[in-house]
Amino acid sequence: MSDYKVKVLGITNVTHDVKSLKLEKPKGFSFTPGQAADVAVNKSGYAEQKRAFTFTGLNEWDYLEFTIKIYNEHNGVTKEIANLQTGDEVIISDPWGSIQYKGEGIFIAGGAGVTPFIAIIRSLNSENKIGNNKLIFANKMENDIIHKDEFVKILGKNFKNILSDEKVEGYGNGFITEEFLKSSVDDFNKTFYLCGP
C-alpha cells in the first residue's frame, strides 16, 4: 500500500465536535464510496499514528474530503487534526475496505458511524438514484446530527432521527430498538447497511 503526503486545503466545522477536512487529491487517486484510508498528521510524534477515516466526498471531486469527529479530551490524532491549518501536511494511504452499496435499502448509523454512508448517499444523489433509500440516524442530541440539512434535502421523509439524550418534536427518543425499527421500516426484506460510532 502506498502513502501520499498531501496538503490541507481547508478545515470547517460540521457540528460542535465534527470537522470536515479538505485535502489535495493525488494524481490518479481513486476510491469507491464507502471506502476509507489511513490518515496521519505529518509532524513529529504523529506521522506514525495512523487512524482510519472514511472518504465523505465524491471520487469525481478534485479534492479529498473526510468528516471526522474530534475528541479534544484525548491528546490524540483527532485533536491534532482539529488544530491543522491550511497548508499543513497529512499522510494518507491508498483506499481500502468498503461498505459497498448493494441496492436500495435501509442505512442505520450511530453518531460518527454515518461517515461511510455520506459518500454513498451523495453518490446516489448525484446520479439521480436515491430512490427509496432510507437513513435512520441515532445521536445523543440534535446538535450532534452530522450533515443534517444535507440529509433532509436529499432524503426528505426517508431521513429518520432518534435522540437518546434529548426530546425534540418530530424525532424519535431513546435508542434504536426492535419497536423503533418496526415503526420506521416498512420492508424488512430490503438490504440493511449498519455502522456504529
Image (cartoon, rainbow, N blue to C red):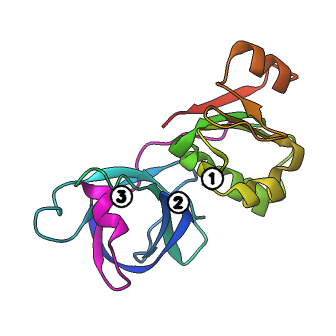
Q: Check disc 1 and give the amino acid type.
A: Asn
Q: Is residue 192 visible?
A: yes
Read off the residue under disc 1: 143
Q: 147 above or below 27?
A: above
Read off the residue under disc 2: 16
The nearer-to-camera label among 1 and 3 is 1
Q: Residues within 10 Å of mark 2 (few under 14, many from 20)?
A: few
Residue under the image location 62 percent in, 31 percent down: 164
Residue 96: % across, % down = 40, 48
| Segment tinted magenta in the rendering | 76-102
Q: Check disc 2 and give the amino acid type.
A: His
Q: Check disc 3 and give the amino acid type.
A: Asp
Q: Find out whether residue 34 is within the magenta segment.
A: no
Task: Indicate the secondary structure of the residue bearing disc 3.
Answer: loop
Residue under the image location 41 percent in, 54 percent down: 95
Distance of mark 1 from mark 2, alpha carbons?
7 Å
Read off the residue under disc 3: 94
